[in-house]
Image (tube, helix red, strand yellow):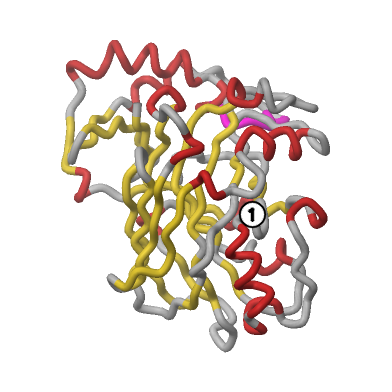
Amino acid sequence: MRLCRFNSNRLGVVQGDQVFDVTEALDVLPSVSYPLPQVDPLIANLDKVRARIDELLPAASSCALADVTLLSPVANPGKLVAAPVNYRKHLEEARADAEIHHNNQVAEIQRVGLFLKATSSLVGPSQGVALRHTDRRNDHEIELAVVIGKAGSRISRADAWSHVAGYCIGLDMTVRGPEERSLRKSIDSYSVLGPWLVTADEIADATQLDFWLTVNGEPRQSANTRDLVIGIPELIEFASAFYTLHEGDVLYTGTPEGVGPVQPGDVIVANIEGIGEMRVNVSKA
């Protein structure tokens, strides 16, 4: 199932070029009060929501996908976890390009570990990227994003797949400079997630997905998830060895070589096999 959040926080099912409005399915979510839960309620209750969607879908109204505003399919992630230099050729390009490394040592992911991006940086594809610090280089980084569907701590790689709710396309936008990654990658709108959530049962093998990115039609990045240095189950094991992963947490798995600058007015198109394509406009904040 392809679930999107669109327009004014409507819930939709994407089929072909149509979005079917199944917002009524959100009625099965439990009511909450202060303090708010540390999970995304939709992802935490995804099975119940999907069962209700199955009842609603035959009579659901629809509209053209091209006419809707696509928001992040996950509204309230507790954490955005990101894997740096998780493709070998990107590690090599980062070490070779001073505009990327800024005299910082670019070490292997096994040494530097993971980092967190502020949840306030999260947007959907229709909201676009608004660049800050345009006197510096601002780069695109396409990544497979994994949405956690079952909470866990110290998850073994053997059990990791059972903790995955689904997948999205992620853009881990980056302003280059000497500061720590988490600061430079946590600017408002620098974590794009979309275009929808593809539930785990729709992806037969997430370890063998082709993906690519263009800017204004120019090919920039192209790779396959088989090239990950640390694979998806190992990343889940790695992250959960340090902190509990909750329902709705998002894991950005890393970007391949070909990262490059974007400017206001550019259009980024990102595509991942089995998920789809998203178009992201770039502006200046």
Q: Percent x, y for residue 215?
A: 36, 71
Q: Percent x, y for residue 53?
A: 33, 18
Q: Please, what secondary structure does the residue beneath circle 1 have?
A: loop
Q: Is residue 158 above or below residue 118?
A: above
Task: Give left or right: position of 147 versus 128.
Answer: right
User: Which of 216 and 63 lies nearest the eye of the viewer?
Assistant: 216
Q: Quadrant of the N terminus?
A: top left
User: Which of 76 and 96 lies nearest the eye of the viewer?
Assistant: 96
User: Which of 279 and 133 lies nearest the eye of the viewer?
Assistant: 279
Q: Is residue 234 above or below residue 277?
A: above
Visible in this render: residue 206? yes
Range covered by the magenta-colored residues: 35-41
User: Which of 28 and 167 lies nearest the eye of the viewer?
Assistant: 167
Say which residue appears at 40% left-offset and 52% top-offset.
Answer: 211
Q: Percent x, y for residue 193?
A: 47, 49
The kind of residue on which mark 1 rests is Asn
Q: How many marks?
A: 1
Task: Give left or right: position of 114 versus 198.
Answer: right
Say which residue appears at 53% left-offset and 72% top-offset.
Answer: 139
Q: Is residue 21 magenta?
A: no
- List the residue tagged with mark 1: 86
Magenta span: helix, strand or loop, mainly? Answer: loop
Q: Is residue 252 above or below residue 264?
A: above
Q: Is residue 39 magenta?
A: yes
Task: Give left or right: position of 252 versus 235.
Answer: left
Say which residue appears at 65% left-offset and 60% top-offset.
Answer: 85
